[in-house]
Amino acid sequence: MGVVREILLAGLISGGVGLLLSVLYLGVRVAVRIGREGPVPEFGSPLSYRITVPAGIDGRPGETFLAPSESRYIGVINSDASRSDCAVRLGPGSRLLVVCFGPVAARGTAADSAAYSIEAMQRRGAAKCTIPPTPTKFAGLPATTYTLHLRGGRILHELKFEHNGWLYGVGILTREEHSAAAREQAGAILRTWQWLDGSRPSAAQVSTGAVSLIRPT
């Protein structure tokens, strides 16, 4: 069940605006279809796999990007109607996770979700916010980024943003000794991001978004 604990479910605490590892801290178990996962890539490995999450019939956008590993699941709809899009290995002990939380009208803005998630995790003693929410951009869109140190020694660098009325989160789950390398690899991945709802950000916009996960603009 280790992989299930690392899924960005983002919706299992207090009405659904949860965060990565909420499934771990609340002891919830979720059944997902897990595929075969290859060897752990080294940081800086070529982006040899294309990850594609189809757009949903409910109107939520899909996305596609390149990664150094496959994802063990694609577009899993959770019990709260959030969608766990993927979890790809960045390198030893590190993953990049993507989730579509749901409509902004129901889940709140990126800034609201960031504030709620931080408060909820800290109140439960599950994490400490070490870099507070900071306005930035992702793929040309307004976004909010922050960092949590999780109980047990792991670090979560999180980016939340909105696209066509849907709330998204991208997280880098890693450890202190791998943090810089994991963020650099995530930046390379996110520079290849494209939406699958008819919109196509320019290369410059995608590049700006990737950098924003590493440092605020």
Image (cartoon, rainbow, N blue to C red):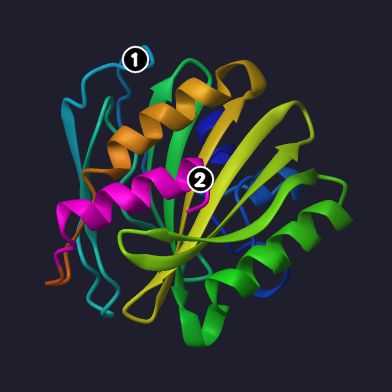
Question: According to the image, label 1 marks what residue?
Answer: 41
In the rendered structure, which amino acid carries the disc numbered 2? Gly
Task: Give the total of numbered labels.
Answer: 2
- Residues under labels 1 and 2: Cα distance? 18 Å
Where residue 191 sits: x, y (%)?
26, 43
Residue at image position (47%, 32%) is 183
Question: According to the image, label 2 marks what residue?
Answer: 171
Q: Quadrant of residue 41?
A: top left
Q: Is residue 149 left or right of residue 198?
A: right
Asked if residue 113 lies in the magenta stretch, the reply is: no
Where residue 97 sits: x, y (%)?
44, 43
* Residue sticking out furthest to the bottom: 105
- The label shown at residue 127 is none
Q: Which secondary structure is most common in the magenta stretch?
A: helix
Residue at image position (31%, 79%) is 164
Q: Quick check: 207 above or below 89?
A: below
Circle 1 sits in a helix, a strand or a loop, which is it? loop
Look at the numbered discs 1 and 2 and tell me whether their residues touch, using CB distance below 8 Å.
Answer: no
* Residue sticking out furthest to the front: 217
Asked if residue 210 lies in the magenta stretch, the reply is: yes
Where residue 98 sits: x, y (%)?
41, 50
Q: Which residues are magenta?
A: 200-217
Question: Would residue 46 be visible to someone looking at this image?
Answer: yes
Residue at image position (22%, 76%) is 57
Report crowding for label 1: few under 14, some 14 to 19, many 20 or more residues within 10 A (C-alpha). Answer: some
Q: Is residue 39 left or right of residue 18?
A: left
Report crowding for label 2: few under 14, some 14 to 19, many 20 or more residues within 10 A (C-alpha). Answer: many
Question: Would residue 72 be visible to someone looking at this image?
Answer: no
